[in-house]
Amino acid sequence: MQEADMKNLLRVLGIAAVVGVGVMIYRMIKQYREDSVFDLAPAAAAPGQKRSISPELLSILADPADKGPIELLTDAQGKEWLVNRRNGYRYPVEDGIPIMLLEEGEKNKDESLIQK
């Protein structure tokens, strides 16, 4: 009788281990997908093609000066900027990476961008 109980216990523990590993794999895949939402364009972009900020990342970025929303603009030379129209600060975007330093915004301030 004890031998049968031991076999049943080992079976239950084996099934629980398999279910546990399955849950761990599921959670790892789910976390990877959530983390991948904010990825930039592929690093190996086609020649002549620039990387840009993903719309998901742009929606959560905020101006470090006033913590308000910003927008992505491209100037006449094709350079991308993150612009705060409340104070005229422009933050450069280099190879798809926003440079969100307060000093950069102050240095590149453009009074013509301020909306009244």
Image (tube, helix red, strand yellow):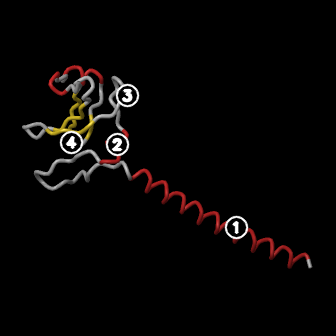
Element on which disc 3 rests: loop
Q: Judging from the image, what secondary structure is the residue with disc 4 in? A: loop
The disc labelled 3 sits on which kind of residue?
Lys
Callout in the foreground (2, 4)? 2
Q: Which residue is mark 4?
A: 95
Would you say the residues marked 4 and 3 are in contact, meaning their CB atoms lie under 8 Å apart?
Answer: no
Quarter residue 57 falls in: top left
Three-letter code for the amino acid on which mark 4 is drawn: Asp
Q: Which residue is identified by label 3?
A: 67
Mark with earlier residue (3, 1): 1
As drawn, which residue projects farthest toward the left? 77
Label 1 residue SS: helix
State which tag comes first along the sequence, 3 or 2.
Answer: 2
Identity of the residue drawn at 49% across and 58% down: 30
Residue assigned mark 1: 16
Which image quarter: residue 103? top left
